Image (cartoon, rainbow, N blue to C red):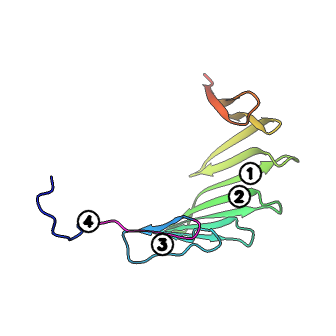
Amino acid sequence: MLARNTGRVVDGEEFRYDAAANRLNFNTSRFDHVKDNRLRQWANQEYKYDAWGNLIEKVVGIVRWQTFTYDCENRLVKTETMADTQVESTSSYQYDSLGRRVAKQSEIKGQTDHKRFLWQGQRMLREESPGQSSLYIYEPGSYAPLARVDEKEG
């Protein structure tokens, strides 16, 4: 209940937007501008892009960062996450001749994981890894998935 209006704003919020209607930042006097519709900084995260607009580096604070590598067709082929100068995880991706991702290999803290992706046209039907798989069910005549059925071995 408002008892008296003093005209002062208490705990106000302030938002700023770029020309593409992206929120730049809030509740701070420092606003970072979005150039070429690419976010460069948000809170304690910094983003870097290549000439094609692909994200190539994400830095969180001063001790954690990720790098992203792309092939000549701008497909993501490798990611690496570092924490305190130590490699925390790496992932590599493989594609078929139609540009569909067909495999992902990850190593996270010494544990290796392999995934395969099976396709029918442009629809991903199945995702398989040792011990489990996921089946995707689509709306008829659409690329919109309706459901995912997960199955674990054993």
Location of residue 22 by image quarter? bottom right
Magenta residues (range): 12-20
Tell me which amino acid carries mark 3: Ile
- Comparing 31 with 100, the one in front is 31
Residue that mark 1 sits on: 93
Q: Which callout, 4 or 2, points at the residue further toward the start of the chain?
A: 4
Q: Position of residue 112 (x, y in %)?
A: 64, 46
Badge 1 element? strand
Residue 36 position (above or below residue 142): below
Location of residue 82 by image quarter? bottom right
For image coordinates 62% across by 29% down, the residue present is: 147
Mark 4–mark 2 Cα distance, whole angstroms, equals 44 Å
For image coordinates 75% across by 68% down, the residue present is: 52
Mark 1–mark 2 Cα distance, whole angstroms, equals 6 Å
- Comparing 44 with 61, the one in front is 44
Q: Are marks 1 and 2 in contact (CB under 8 Å)?
A: yes
Q: Which callout, 1 or 2, points at the residue further toward the start of the chain?
A: 2
